[in-house]
Structures are given as C-alpha cells and as structure tokens.
Image (cartoon, coloured by chain):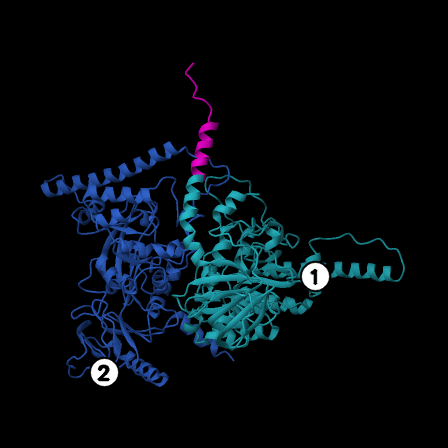
Chain colours: A cyan, B blue
C-alpha cells in the first residue's frame, strides 16, 4: 500500500465517516428534475432524506451553511479515462474480454482534482483503438478509498465500441504511429483499415455472438429436458456481446462522422440492440432525426473542433441542435482537465444554441445518469437518491463559480476551505519527506572508492 | 429587454451591407461603454469615423450623415486580443499539409508568420464571433523561431489584416531535461531510452544557452560590419532580421517554463540588452520578483489547465495570474492553441475567481495586450484616436452566457457568421 503517497497527495483526507445527518441550509437548491428554490437538503444514511423550502432540521444534524450559495447534484462525467492503469488493448480489434475494472488506480490525483471540480460519478472507459474495445468501470470520486471502494455497486456494465480514424490507425501503414529513434519490428497491419471494414468487423462479431448464444441456448434447453450434454466452451470474447444482445450490457460507442453513426445504429437495429450512448458524436447534429428514432443517447464536447479530419465539421451548436430534435444529450470530458469544469462547458451550450439554464445543467447531471443506467440513483436532487451533492459559491453556470464542498453518499469528500488551510502543512510534510529520502540515499550510497 | 435586444440586432444586421463602403461614420449610442482605460460610461456615445474612434463620452457631437446604432441595454467593450495563437498558420492540427507553424532549422529570425497567414482560415471568423478582434500569431520550434505578427481578425489579405507585421521575435529558451510542463513530454521517457545524468544535462543546457549568446554576438558583428560598409559587405537576411531586436525596437518573446529557465532567460536578455516578453506562465510565479524588477510582462497560459506537478494545489493555474499581478507584473492572456481561441475570455474569468481583480482581467485581454505588443497608443481601449476595434455584448464579455452581438474591426462592422453558424442553420432546417 503506497500509504505515504496517498497521505501526501490527498490535499485533505476526508474523515471517511458520515455524520448521522447533514443539513445543507440557506442555499439556492437546483434539483434539476423538481425545480429550483431556496431551501434545505437533508442527507442521511448516504441518501437524500428530505428536500424542500420548508424542511425541519432533525436534532443532532450537522448544519452546513450555504447562504448565498448554490446546491446541485454531483456532476456525472460519462466519458473519462482517469483512474485507470491502462486504456487500450490495441493488439486486436475485438477486445471485448478486457475490463477496465481490473486496472483501477485509486491513487490517481485526477480523482481528487475531478472531485474539486464538482464531479462525483464517472465512467472510466477503454480507449478507442479497437472496433470493440473492452468493458468499462463506473466509479465515484471517493478519494481515499481503494479500487473496490470507488466502484458503484450494481451499476450496469458498459461495453465500449469505436469507429473511424482511431480504429483504422493500426490498419494503415501511413497512420501507424512510429516513434523516431526506436526501431520496432513492424507487426502485420491489423484489420480493419477502413470504415467499410469497421462495419464488417461489427457484423462478423455479432454473427459469431449469435451463434454462440444459440449454442448455449441449445445446451440449456437440453439440460432442462433432463439430458446430460457437453457444455459449449466458454468464450470470454463473445460473452459480453451476448450480454449486449440480451440487453444486460450497455453499448457506448466512440463515433465522429454521420456515416459511421448511422451505420452503427443500423447494425444495432439488425441485431436488435440499442445504443445507450454515442460518444463524441460531433456530427450527430447531421443525423439527429435518426439518433432520436433509435432512442440512442449522445455525449459530446461543447466546443472541440478541427483537431483531426473527422472533427472538421464539429460545431458548438451540436448539443443544442440534437436537444431541439429530441435526442438525449449529455456533455463529457474525455480529459482530466476538462472534467474539472464541466459546469462551464454546459454554460457554453446556452451561448451556442440558446437552451435554458436547467437544460444546460441537465447535460452534466441527469442526462449522463440516464446514459450510464443510473438515473434512478443519481443525477438529480430527489428524496431517496444518493446524497451526491455539490455546493458552488456562485451560480454553477457562471465562469466565476468555484466548488466549495462536495458530498458523495452523504460523506464530505471535498472542502475548499480545508484544502486551502491544509496546504502549508502539506508543503511542510513534503519537504520533510524529501529530506528523509535524501538522508536515506546518502546513507545507502556506497563509500567513495579510492583510486587503485 | 428582449425586444430591445432584438431591435438592436436587427439594426446591426441591416448595417452589414454598408461594410463595403469605406470611410463610413457610425454613432453607437445608448449602451454602457467600457473604455477599459477609464471609468464606465452609462448611456454613452462612441463615434467611429475613418476606421478610428473619433469621439467617446456621455455626450458627443453627431457628425452629419453618420449611421446611428441604438444599443440601449447593451455594452460596448474594446475588441479582445489573444496574445498566443497560430491562427492562419495551422488549420487542422493533425494534418501536416495544413501546418506552417514550425520551420525545420534552429535559427530562422528572418521567417515571418504574417506572410504565411491564410486569410481564409476558419479560425478567423470563429475568433471574431467570440469577440476577439486581434491576435498574435507566432511561429514556434527550434531556437529563434521567427517573427510573430499582430493582426486583425478581418481583412481580404494578410497585408490588410496586419497591425504589426513584425510584433516580436520568438525564442524557445532551453531547459534542463527538456519538455517540462506544457508542450513537452512531461519528463516521460520512451521505453528503452537512457536517462542522461543531471550534471551532463546541465552541461548541455548551459551550452545551448551559450550557443544563443554566440548567435547574438554574430548578429552584433554583422551590425558593425554593416555600419562600416565597404565592398565586402553583403546583406544577410538572417542577421538583418535580428537588427531590430538588438536595437531594442523589437521585443524578444521568450518561451520558458521552469523557474530556472525563466531566471536564465531574464539574465540572458539583460546581458544582451534586449526587451523581453515571457510567453507562458509555467513557474513564472516562482520568479515574479525578478520579472517585476526587470518589468518583463507575461503572456499567461491557459488557466483552465492542470497543475504542473502531481502534488501542486489543484487550482494552481487559476491563482498564478493573480499572484503575478499582485507582484506588480503586467500580464495578458493567450490561448496557446487555435482550437480554444474562443475561450480566451473564460480563461481570464477563471483567474478572477481565484484572486485576479476583474479590471485587471479585462485589461489582460485588451489594453495590456496592446501595450505589451507595442501598440498601446493605437489599440486595446475605447479612446479618441484609437483604431475602432469594438465589440457589442449583452453582458460581461468574460462570461460564457453572454452573447457577442456585433463587432467592429478597423471601424467597419465585421461579420459574425462562421462555418459553425452556417452548419447550425443548415442542419436546423433539415426536414
């Protein structure tokens, strides 16, 4: 256990026990789903126990004064790669057997930084190098807990797919990344190398999955009939695809251009699965009608554009157009920095498309909750939901707003005042540790050799 | 309120065709005018004539035949200036063919960004639509990377766009280990690479600094030879380009990130007697006193950025601009990447909430930038006689929820239409 590193990196290790009851009083409460009002939020046993304009504060409750401040649900980032020791199993284009849940790094400082940006739940995904990437992990920013302690128990599993440029890269001799100065044996080109091939890999994979599913059905039917058949050999690559076909695993796919978005939805229709979330989806605005008809969710950037060819037609009006055309839209970060100010990203969609304030905040709360299958538990301030709450000093859509406190499951994991007041002690501790290390290195150094 | 806004927009829209006519006179009235150089003027008047601000105040004489623009409920600010971009030099970042930002030689003082600016770049209208009316576009890479230009984000040719064709000479200062902080490899190593011992890295670093001194010495010898004249003297475009730097007429814009490099860069410029501008915040806050002592301005990097080190405070990049200003250092903001040019004002806002006074933040995207780039008498504030680069907003320009309603560049209404607004309209109308 790298306890020293944890202690040092934690700006302020929270007391990881919740007071029996917390009452957040005096603030403007933005529930997202049930209106905005001046009122009180009661957190109890990790859940929101009560919320409203006139709520009596239970005896013994720890009061948090939010006068003049804004109280809203914790931000949900449905697409991130933080807190993972690995991102891409890039050696094959169908890597559905790998799982980010196996490589969670609970000591990634990005967790604390995200928390300080008001983020409480994220999905940390497999990368986009493969047509079918790997399984993803839904975690809460419970800084200080171990890998298992970060995971959201009961969260629906998610399988990552990818289309377009990133997938093609390993299939093209021109696009393959060569590091200058390093001579590496050239592996044979990986299939697919085009968008045409990506569709083929998807279809071939699901055909195999269907056959595999049928094998097991036949086996199970025979067992039920009292026979003793030989079970099929388990295939860990196909099992997640069968889970997709049976609606037990959510589909999130990286997509940029309208052609590949439409292609993916059609493959889904053909095999009978719904796409829970189209990721990035920068040309989603061109096929909003088709996306809405498929009932697919979309998570996108507010204003990223033109950083590569498939992002040429990216426009900051993307989210607003899709919203207006009936698509369930959210914003994501895909980036350890951007995830720290998703509230400001939401504010931009008001500028680029004129949506309402509540619609803007929905983009980073209840909409992503739906796309990761957790909208019954998180994404809004409602009685019975997880007590994941953020307090801002100014309206969260202002570029001047700062996160003051963050609660997850009713436990305070971030407090700006504590962070600041702890900085001097942290600095002193760091100096002491460096001194100690230097001391140890001096002692461990071999004695200076005399010239022979 | 809503009706008034609509009226104003309609009115401005009607003005656009007039852009073709030169020497037009406009009177903007009814708005709150924020000159930046002085106190705000409620219900103020700005008179624009021949591309310049002819008058500004609570009252002003209205010239005959002027086009009157009613702006009740709106605000007039100076156009914003982005002090670190590669606009016109880079289009799609990942495509080599559309990237002209970096030459393949170490010393190219003679190369000029301005002559490679593509006036049809999509980034130009996108910047305008965000209220940015002028930018520094700078070459990078090597050691002496070439000349940065200050240009309007409007014009048919780069010549028309240029405010100062040569606004600064770019220098990439060496660093130990190379690549600390932004733009490098963060100290990471390729697998199999050998780590060079620190003493050796330091020796190489000092040698690289000496090599720059040697280059400056050679330029000085050229200067002397030129003064002496004689039949053997031949014009050398490289050293010729260095002359304004040596004469202190053209600032040296130095990219340096870690405290040691910044300190050494200050010493370098002091020794060479050249005017320095520090590009990028990096660890500038650690040497704020040295910067102040030599009156070296800083182009602050994005505040919406990660801390330099793993154990630095989470809000480190937000607090640096405020700390620099508190130490008396003059700052301006740059976005350091075309893609996020339109977020310039938000970068400034994200320093305000962490200690930078609002007025200073506003100056850092307007007047300070103009002063740092040598055009403080022509640009950056709403003052009589200055170039009429103005924006009209429905609120604080540093907030994302505020809308940029119109821009004037060189005294003419500038279109706020972009590739993005065109696609927006086109696909909203898709049946």
Tell me if B289 is positioned left or right of A436 in this view.
Answer: left
Residue farthest front in this picture: A59
Total marks drawn? Answer: 2
Q: Secondary structure at mark 1?
A: helix
Residue farthest right in this picture: A226
Tell me if B78 is positioned left or right of A403 in this view.
Answer: left
Q: Nearer the viewer, residue A398 or B238?
A: A398
Q: Main secondary structure of the magenta part?
A: helix
Up the image or down, B144 lies above or below A398; here it is above
Q: Secondary structure at mark 2?
A: strand
Tell me which corner region of the image, top left, top right, bottom left or bottom right, holds residue B356.
Answer: bottom left
Q: Chain of mark 1?
A: A
Tell me which corner region of the image, top left, top right, bottom left or bottom right, holds residue B262.
Answer: top left
Instruction: Identify which residue is drawn at 14% across, 81% down.
Output: B61
Up the image or down, B185 lies above or below B388; here it is above
Tell me if B336 is positioned left or right of A381 in this view.
Answer: left
User: Residue A163 appears at what percent x and percent y?
Assistant: 56, 60
Mark 1: give few (<14), some (14-19) or many (20+) Cα within 10 Å. Answer: some
Q: Nearer the viewer, residue B116 or A65?
A: A65
Separation of residues labelled 2 and 1 (CA atoms): 67 Å
Mark 2: give few (<14), some (14-19) or many (20+) Cα within 10 Å. Answer: some
For the magenta stretch, what is the residue range?
A433-452
Residue located beneath label 1 in the image:
A243
Q: Quadrant of the C terminus of chain A?
A: top left
Instruction: Identify which residue is drawn at 37% across, 32% down.
Output: B200
Residue located beneath label 2 in the image:
B68
Q: Chain of mark 2?
A: B
Tell me which corner region of the image, top left, top right, bottom left or bottom right, holds residue B68.
Answer: bottom left
The answer to whether residue A257 shows anywhere in this view is no
Q: Is residue A318 magenta?
A: no
User: Residue B51 appears at what percent x and percent y?
Assistant: 20, 72
Q: Quadrant of the N terminus of chain A?
A: top right
């Amino acid at each position: 256990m790298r306890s020293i590193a944890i202690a040092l990196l934690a700006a302020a290790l929270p007391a990881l026990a919740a007071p029996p009851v917390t009452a957040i009083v005096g603030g403007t409460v933005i529930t997202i789903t049930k209106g905005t009002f001046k009122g009180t939020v009661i957190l109890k046993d990790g859940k929101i126990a009560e919320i409203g304009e006139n709520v009596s504060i239970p005896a013994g409750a720890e009061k948090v004064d939010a006068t003049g401040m804004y109280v809203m649900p914790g931000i949900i980032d449905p697409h991130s790669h933080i807190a993972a020791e690995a991102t891409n199993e890039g050696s094959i284009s169908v890597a559905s057997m790998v799982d980010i849940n196996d490589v969670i790094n609970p000591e990634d400082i990005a967790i604390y930084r995200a928390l300080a940006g008001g983020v409480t739940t994220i999905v940390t995904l497999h990368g986009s190098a493969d047509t079918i990437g790997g399984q993803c992990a839904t975690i809460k920013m419970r800084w200080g807990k171990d890998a298992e302690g970060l995971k959201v128990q009961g969260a629906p599993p998610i399988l990552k797919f990818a289309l377009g440029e990133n997938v093609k890269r390993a299939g093209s001799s021109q696009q393959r990344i060569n590091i200058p100065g390093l001579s590496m044996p050239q592996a044979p080109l990986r299939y697919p190398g085009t968008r045409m091939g990506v569709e083929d890999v998807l279809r071939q994979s699901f055909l195999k999955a269907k056959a595999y599913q049928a094998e097991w059905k036949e086996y199970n039917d025979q067992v039920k009939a009292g026979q003793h058949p030989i079970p099929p050999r388990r295939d860990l690559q196909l099992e997640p695809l069968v889970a997709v076909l049976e609606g037990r695993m959510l589909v999130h796919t990286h997509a940029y251009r309208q052609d590949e978005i439409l292609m993916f939805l059609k493959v889904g229709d053909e095999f009978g699965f719904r796409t829970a979330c189209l990721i990035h989806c920068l040309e989603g605005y061109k096929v909003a009608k088709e996306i809405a008809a498929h009932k697919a969710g979309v998570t996108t950037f507010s204003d990223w554009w033109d950083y590569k060819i498939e992002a040429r037609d990216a426009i900051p009006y993307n989210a607003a157009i899709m919203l207006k055309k009936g698509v369930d839209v959210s914003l994501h970060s895909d980036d350890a920095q951007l995830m720290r100010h998703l509230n400001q990203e939401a504010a931009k969609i008001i500028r680029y498309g004129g949506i309402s304030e509540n619609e803007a905040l929905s983009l980073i709360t209840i909409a992503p909750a739906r796309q990761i299958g957790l909208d019954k538990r998180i994404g809004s301030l409602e009685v019975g939901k997880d007590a994941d709450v953020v307090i801002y000093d100014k309206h969260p859509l202002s570029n001047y707003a700062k996160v003051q406190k963050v609660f997850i499951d009713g436990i305070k994991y971030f407090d700006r005042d504590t962070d600041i007041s702890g900085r001097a002690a942290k600095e002193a501790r760091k100096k002491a540790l460096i001194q100690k290390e230097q001391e140890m290195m001096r002692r461990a150094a071999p004695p200076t050799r005399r010239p022979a | 309120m809503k009706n008034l806004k609509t009226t104003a927009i309609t009115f401005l829209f009607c003005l656009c065709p007039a852009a073709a006519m030169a020497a037009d006179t406009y009177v903007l009235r009814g708005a709150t005018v924020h000159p930046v150089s002085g106190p705000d003027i409620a219900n103020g008047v700005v008179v624009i004539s021949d591309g310049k601000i002819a008058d500004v105040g609570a009252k002003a004489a209205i010239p005959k035949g002027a086009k009157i623009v009613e702006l009740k409920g709106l605000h007039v600010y100076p156009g914003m200036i982005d002090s670190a971009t590669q606009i016109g030099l880079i289009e799609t970042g990942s495509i080599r063919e559309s990237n002209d930002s970096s030459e393949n030689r170490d010393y190219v003082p003679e190369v000029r960004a301005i002559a490679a600016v593509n006036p049809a770049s999509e980034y130009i209208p996108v910047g305008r639509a965000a209220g940015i009316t002028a930018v520094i576009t700078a070459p990078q890479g090597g050691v002496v990377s070439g000349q940065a230009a200050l240009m309007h984000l409007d014009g048919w040719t780069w010549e028309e766009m240029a405010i100062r064709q040569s606004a600064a000479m770019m220098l990439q200062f060496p660093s130990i280990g190379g690549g600390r902080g932004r733009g490098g490899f963060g100290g990471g190593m390729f697998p199999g690479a050998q780590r060079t011992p620190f003493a050796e890295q330091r020796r190489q670093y000092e040698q690289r600094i000496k090599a720059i001194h040697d280059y400056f010495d050679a330029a000085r010898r050229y200067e002397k030879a030129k003064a002496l004249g004689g039949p053997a003297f031949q014009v050398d475009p490289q050293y010729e380009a260095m002359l304004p730097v040596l004469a202190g007429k053209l600032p040296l814009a130095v990219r340096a990130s870690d405290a040691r490099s910044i300190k050494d860069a200050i010493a370098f410029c002091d020794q060479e007697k050249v005017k320095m501008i520090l590009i990028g915040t990096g660890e500038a806050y650690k040497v704020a006193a040295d910067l102040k002592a030599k009156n070296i301005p800083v182009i602050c990097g994005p505040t919406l950025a990660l801390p330099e080190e793993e154990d630095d405070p989470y809000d480190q990049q937000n607090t640096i601009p405020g700390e620099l200003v508190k130490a008396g250092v003059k700052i301006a903001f740059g976005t350091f990447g075309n893609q996020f040019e339109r977020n310039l004002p938000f970068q400034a806002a994200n320093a305000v909430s962490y200690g930078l006074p609002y007025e200073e933040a506003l100056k850092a995207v307007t007047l300070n930038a103009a002063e740092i780039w040598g055009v403080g008498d022509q640009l950056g504030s709403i003052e009589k006689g200055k170039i009429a680069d103005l924006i009209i907003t429905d609120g604080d320009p540093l907030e994302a929820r505020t809308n940029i309603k119109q821009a004037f560049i060189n005294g003419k209404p500038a279109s706020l239409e972009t590739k993005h607004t065109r696609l927006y309209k086109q696909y909203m109308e898709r049946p």
